Amino acid sequence: MEHLDPKVLGQILLLQSTLAVAPDSTTLGEQTCHALRAIPGLMASALRVHGQVLAAEPSGVIPLHELPQSLEPHPTTSSPTQQPWIEVLPLQTCRANYGQLILAIADRKEFRPYASYLQNTSNMIALVVENLIQASELQELNKNLEAQVYQRTKELQESEERNRLVIQASNEGVWDWDLKTDFVYYSPRWKEILGYADSELENHINTWLRTIHPDDLEIAQQRLDDHFREDQPFSHTSRFFHKDGSLRWVQVNGFALRDETGKPYRMIGNHRDITERKQAEEALRASEEKYRLVVENAHDAIFIAQDGCIKFPNRRLAVLSGYSLEELTQIPFLESVHPEDRDLVAAMHHGRIRGEEVPTTYSFRVMSKTGETSWVELSSVLIPWEGKAASLNFLRDITVQRKLESQLRQAQKMEAIGTLA
């Protein structure tokens, strides 16, 4: 059995436990390379992200200029007789390949016992890099969004409203329908969800009619009629045909803009690809264990509710609520719901458990462990769990979206007042 120095192993585990708190990529690189110097047999290390060297200790040992700049994973680059032995570990997640952790190994025998720990470390670094990139992108989106909201309250131009929705939806497809002409603006992301380039689909209502599954068309049109006639929320799930012939599950949301008589003249909404969510539901029905593997890394908060308690939460729910996974299973799930919304959530949940026809998607406010209030959107389905009825729930934070919708409606009121004047 290979010998592991407890002090070195502790240093590696300490590094892994502190990666997530690195404030930026440069600090992450310096923190990593400094910690790896304690590993026996390792002469030097370097961290490279998107072609940029973030850190190298000691510097000058690894011939970085001779290594490929590509983010694709590479095998070991040295020959068996070359010293030092250069090992390249890709920084790869399920979404992308961000760079490489490069190791210069002087003594492979001494280094070998720690190889698997460094592979795990590189995987964790990749996730931290991905989170830092996403946080930076989100911060930039928020800055742009604030500027556009300010401009929109003054002018309310159509192009600015469209930009608001694009930023608000981030990874969602946006559509903007002129009810008089049937011209529909489909954002590039809307078309990308279905596998098309921006130029491959016509910006017309016929594109929607052609790509939606025929079996889902009738209910979609009924929801649309209800929204126009009674101003009921327009939200439903439909299947759409992908360019390759497969089916994509899509969550459709939208709202109509109305003239002074209340007649709709325009409709704006978004498409969210929930195919993975549907696959997660199927995985649960097939195997609870397989389902756990899917949901533990899901972007949405996911939990199973039964008998007023949370039977199974994922990590994202713990992050959103501020409670630990253990705490979440020990408190009534309604305790985290805003007091003014508890009756609504309770009615929806108990109605679903009884098999009544209740909305699958609705929004309400929740309170974190520290007392902070957020708006969330809940999608829920009835499932069997340990021989009894339960609900499988998908929870998404929509606080920013709700604030922006409120600002847009206030701006529309101001525009209407200006028109009447």
Image (tube, rainbow, N blue to C red):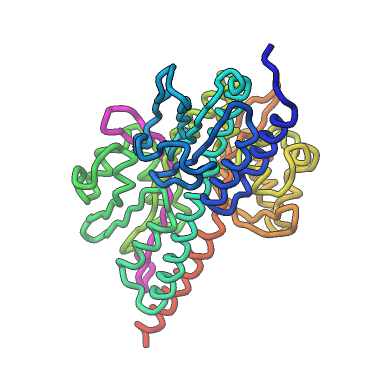
Residue 318 on image: x %, y %: 68, 43
**Along the line of sight, the residue nearer the viewer: 74 or 413:** 74
Q: Position of residue 24 (x, y in %)?
A: 54, 53
Q: Is residue 330 magenta?
A: no
**Residue 215 or 144: which is nearer the viewer?**
144
Pick the residue in front: 220 or 385.
385
Q: Which residues are magenta?
A: 239-263
Q: Quadrant of the N terminus?
A: top right
Instruction: Examine the image and state in which quarter residue 326 appears.
Output: top right
Q: Farthest residue to the right: give it.
A: 330
Q: Residue at x 63, y 57 (%)?
A: 374
Kindly tell me whether residue 416 is visible in this rendering.
yes
Q: How many numbered circles does the render carry?
A: 0
**Which residue appears at 31% of the width and 64% of the height?**
265
Q: Residue at x 72, y 50 (%)?
A: 336
Q: Tell me which secondary structure the magenta stretch mostly adopts.
A: strand
Residue 372 position by quadrant = bottom right
Determine whether, in the image, residue 125 is placed left or right of residue 178.
Answer: right
Q: Check residue 251 for magenta coloring.
A: yes
**Residue positioned 22% across, 56% down in the render:** 183
> Measured along the vertical axis of the image, is residue 89 above or below residue 266?
above
332 or 400, nearer to the observer: 400
Q: Position of residue 402 (x, y in %)?
A: 53, 61
Q: Is residue 304 visible?
A: no
Locate residue 26 relative to residue 215 in the image: left or right.
right
Q: Quadrant of residue 8?
A: top right
In the visual, does 324 lie left or right of 136? right
The answer to whether 174 is drawn above or below residue 261 in the figure is above
